[in-house]
Amino acid sequence: MSVATEIPSKTKEAIWERGPGFGEGWRNLWGKLNANTITTGIVATIFGCSGPALIVMNAAQNAKLTDVQTISWLFSIYFFGGLISIILGLYYKMPINGAYSIPAAVMLASALPLFSFNEAVGAYLIAGILVLFLGVSGMIGKAMRWVPLPIVMAMIAGAMIRFGTGIVTSTQQAPVIAGAALAGYFLGQRLTKKVSPILWSLVVGVVVALLVGGFKFADVKITWLLPRFFAPDFSAGAFFAIAIPLAVLVIGAENAQAYGVLTAQGYKAPINAMTIISGIGGIITSFFGGHNANIAGPMTAICSSDEAGPDKSGRYAATIVNGLTFGAFGLFASVAVPFVKALPVQLVSLLAGLAMIGVLLSAFELAFSSKKFRYGAFFALVIAMSGITILKISSPFWSLVGGIVVSLLVEPKDFN
């Protein structure tokens, strides 16, 4: 199914779709907070503040960024990402989560070393403006017409499959810690559905790591660093290598995935508002050195899942919990980062993989369950999995391009 058949254009929807409003969202919130919503919100935060945070820190290390630049980057994407969750969650009473694009962070690991930090800031700013323009103009439906949902989902599956394989490799590398955490996950699934099995896995993993000395407490050095403003520089290379792929990933991966997940759960997702706030988030975070604060596909998938409880009207409470804790991580990034680094790498990898199981299953299902765009989805999958970089642009972008080109050549009727 093409995203164009799902995402409305300006002629069908107002630019900013109306919701129940903050007052109603706030009044009903307290009755929706329960073991399911609180646990799911915390699990989403654990997922976002562990593996993905390490991806960002790895990209910063590859680019030889200073501690101030790294902390400012983390502050912007976590604080403003959490703010997006709170705003949209309360206003629409839907589990619409904000965070940042993990595939984009993966892309930046190879792209950032090729440019100055200020050029990257300029590219982030342009990407935010492009996304905002598509939302305000109502052209998001037309822009997504050539990005079919199966191809987007295949790209996501290919870009994130390494999180799934991390379950295997981390267990092999640290059989005691990761193995115990994995056992905790399966045991938690059998014991109760009220508490996420990932939380069981985390608790068991941390306890075992403490017993066997898996934490690197000697490396924990706490210093308080404030976020900084950075002036943008502009270059054609950064525009094509960072700005365009980033805008495509925000719209074609994060927004499209979140929209698809919410639609599958029966929500009428406000796609124009989601695009507008993703653009605004990209503009604001760029001045702090952050690549974007946008609607997050994986986080929305976690908080809108069945693990957030049977009451779909109350799952937005998980998003609010996630937004508060996610934003707090950004505020205290300079304190929290050393502790994240102290966690056993294998435990973080395992938790990230377990948290991505639902997202990966949904991505594969949406990519290949339809009879349309099957060849395009396959090539998008393998290109994203390859990790290639061409013209300083990494595989997620080429995955979308390659998948669309293959579908145009082999299955053009599917675009009708």
Image (cartoon, rainbow, N blue to C red):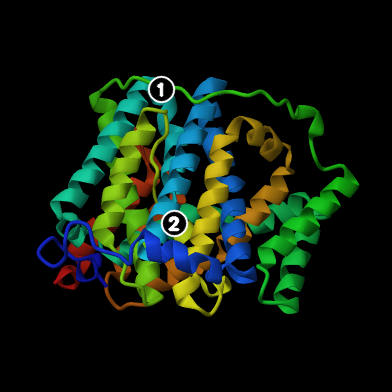
Cα gap from disc 1 to disc 2, whole angstroms: 25 Å
Residue positioned 45% across, 49% down in the render = 386
Is 350 located above or below residue 63 in the figure? below
Where in the figure is residue 122, as x and y percent of width and height? 30, 27
User: Can residue 190 be seen in this snapshot?
Assistant: yes
Query: Which mark identifies residue 97?
Result: 2
Q: Quadrant of residue 187?
A: bottom right
Q: Amino acid at mark 2?
A: Asn
Of residue 131 and residue 62, the one placed in the foreground of this image is 131
Residue positioned 73% across, 78% down in the render = 190
Query: Which mark identifies residue 316?
Result: none
Chain-order first, disc 1 or disc 2 = 2
Is 408 located above or below residue 71 in the figure? below
Q: Amino acid at mark 1?
A: Phe
Judged from the image, the secondary structure of the residue bearing numbered disc 1 is: loop
Residue pointed to by mark 1: 229
Is 148 located above or below residue 163 in the figure? below
Residue positioned 57% across, 60% down in the render = 41
Q: How many marks?
A: 2
Of residue 237 and residue 136, the one placed in the foreground of this image is 136
Where in the figure is residue 73, as x and y percent of width and height? 47, 31
Where in the figure is residue 399, as x and y percent of width and height? 34, 52
Q: Are marks 1 and 2 in contact (CB under 8 Å)?
A: no
